[in-house]
């Protein structure tokens, strides 16, 4: 089929019969003003801003698809025991992050027999990420945020609490992350030896689950998703450093022998856990 050029008046209408041709065909319109009304076998332009699309056998004029909706500001929960989260209007899927509470560092005592007595760092909590689908807006989920462990002097650090997200009126697979174990007191001025805290917390039910790291001497274990544990930077008699990252362990304390006296020091507090809903 050769090119067809139609020239004439600047007003009126032209009807074109759709030709039977093989291969591709192109209609080139001149750069001029005017309105293209319709074609035999063609498509009515429709509303301004529509897109012309093909389904493989015919052309259709339809509104452009709406722009994608960006992820909203995360809904961060740092406290709560069996609290309720209501699935927002229009939300059918979401990302959920769960982190348990970090263990506190061990507190140095007053019964050392060497130059000093010290405590080990607290362990980190378990952490999980999961992707929930098939949700019904208006239904609820229940969540709990685990507290961080509390430090004491001359005693093992407190363990962190368990964080979880479980079914409310919306049924899901439970996501549970236990807290990290508290640091220990190294007995009788055990010195700079490789003594470690108990195991970190565990993570179950998530799409991704990572168990917490073990606290060392004297620093608390960081939580992979949460951040830094307590880190001691001096060998003076000092309390343990509190953890800063969600689910991380607090640092162990140290008490030096000063004229035969050990000044007991508190272990650093573990950082509380967190539950984050993103949709």
Image (tube, rainbow, N blue to C red):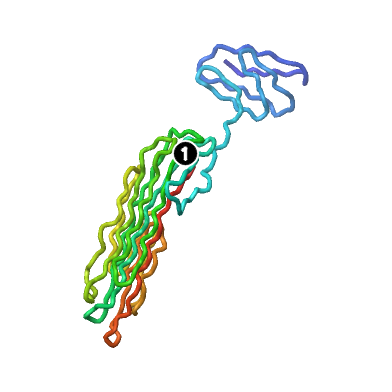
For residue 125, which quarter of the picture? bottom left
Residue 196 place in picture, x, y as percent = 24, 64
Q: Residue at x 61, y 23 (%)?
A: 61
Q: Is residue 188 above or below residue 87?
A: below
Q: Residue at x 37, y 68 (%)?
A: 268
Residue 51 place in picture, x, y as percent = 60, 28
For residue 32, which quarter of the picture? top right
What count of labels does the image hold? 1
Q: Residue at x 31, y 75 (%)?
A: 254
At label 1, counting other C-alpha atoms closer than 10 Å, the crowd grade (few under 14, some 14-19, many 20 or more) is many
Q: Residue at x 55, y 11 (%)?
A: 20
Residue 198 place in picture, x, y as percent = 25, 60
Residue underneath mark 1: 140
For the N terminus, the image quarter is: top right
In this rendering, position of residue 224 left or right of residue 70:
left
Q: Is residue 169 above or below residue 122?
A: above
Q: Residue furthest bottom?
A: 259
Which residue is at the front of the view, 211 or 63? Answer: 211
Which residue is at the front of the view, 249 or 152? Answer: 152
- SS of the residue at dot 1? strand
Residue 25 place in picture, x, y as percent = 56, 20
Q: Is residue 198 above or below residue 164?
A: below
């Amino acid at each position: 089929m050769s090119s067809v050029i139609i020239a004439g008046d600047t007003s009126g209408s032209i009807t074109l019969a759709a030709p039977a041709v093989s291969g591709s065909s192109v209609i080139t319109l001149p750069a001029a003003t005017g309105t293209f009304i319709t074609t035999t076998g063609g498509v009515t332009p429709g509303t301004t801003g529509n897109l012309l699309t093909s389904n493989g056998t015919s052309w259709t004029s339809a509104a452009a698809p709406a722009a994608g909706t960006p992820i909203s500001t995360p809904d961060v929960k740092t406290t709560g025991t069996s609290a309720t989260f209501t699935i927002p209007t229009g939300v059918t899927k979401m990302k959920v992050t769960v982190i348990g509470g970090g263990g506190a560092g061990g507190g140095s005592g007053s019964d050392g027999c060497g130059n000093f007595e010290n405590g080990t760092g607290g362990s980190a909590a378990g952490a999980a990420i999961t992707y929930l689908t098939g949700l019904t807006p208006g239904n609820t989920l229940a969540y709990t945020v685990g507290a961080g462990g509390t430090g004491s002097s001359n005693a093992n650090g407190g363990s962190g609490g368990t964080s979880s997200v479980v079914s409310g009126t919306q049924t899901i697979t439970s996501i549970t992350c236990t807290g990290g174990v508290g640091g220990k007191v190294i007995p009788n001025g055990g010195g700079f030896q490789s003594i470690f805290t108990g195991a970190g917390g565990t993570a179950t039910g998530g799409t991704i689950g990572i168990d917490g790291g073990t606290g060392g001497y004297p620093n608390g274990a960081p939580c992979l998703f949460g951040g830094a544990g307590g880190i001691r930077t001096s060998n003076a008699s000092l309390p343990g450093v509190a953890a800063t990252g969600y689910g991380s362990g607090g640092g162990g304390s140290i008490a030096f022998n000063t004229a035969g006296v050990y000044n007991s020091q508190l272990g650093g507090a573990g950082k509380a856990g967190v539950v984050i809903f993103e949709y």
